[in-house]
Amino acid sequence: MAPTIRIREGVNELLMERFGCSTSGEVAKNIGVSGSAWSRAVRGKSIPGPKLAGLLLQIDGLGFDDLFEVRTEETDRKSA
């Protein structure tokens, strides 16, 4: 099984606070992705694709380990 990345639990709330947002949709807008793509990734229904991962890694003060966890279990999720 190939390793995959997943958005860490609590990242949406962290970014809501950082961006001063009251909804997940506002977080998605600040990141530069659709609300549906963000929602799927945060809920673990899809893995973050290269676009989403790249945009998240551009946020000042947050690194890979703050945002993502590496999963080694087999998954049927699709890239967001």
Image (tube, rainbow, N blue to C red):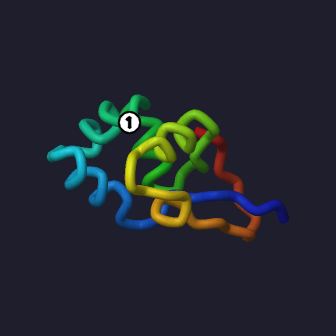
Front-most of 78 and 2?
2
Residue at the spot 57% in from the left edge and 46% down from the top edge: 48
Total labels: the figure holds 1
Identify the amino acid type marked 1: Ile
Where 11 sits versus 58, above or below? Answer: below
The front one of 77 and 20 is 20
Residue 69 placed where, x, y %? Answer: 58, 66
The x, y position of residue 8, in whole percent, is 47, 64
User: Which quarter of the figure is the N terminus placed in?
Assistant: bottom right
At a point 18% along the width and 44% down the height, the residue shown is: 21
Front residue (pair 15, 76): 15
In the rendered image, the residue lying farthest to the right is: 1
Q: In this view, does 59 lie to the left or right of 70?
A: left
Whole-percent x, y for residue 49 in the image = 62, 40
Give left or right: position of 80 versus 28: right
Left or right of 16, for residue 67: right
Note whether 10 is above or below 39 in the view shown: below
Q: Where is residue 65 in the image (x, y as percent from the top left)?
A: 53, 65
Specify whether 72 is left or right of 37: right
Taking the spot 65% from the left edge, 51% from the top edge, the residue there is: 77
Name the residue carrying label 1. Answer: 31
Q: Give the vertical position of 77 relative to 30 (above or below).
A: below
Label 1: which secondary element: helix
Residue 61 is drawn in which quadrant? Answer: bottom left
Bin the neighbour count of mark 1 within 10 Å (Cα to Cα): few under 14, some 14-19, many 20 and up. Answer: some
Image quarter of the C terminus: top right
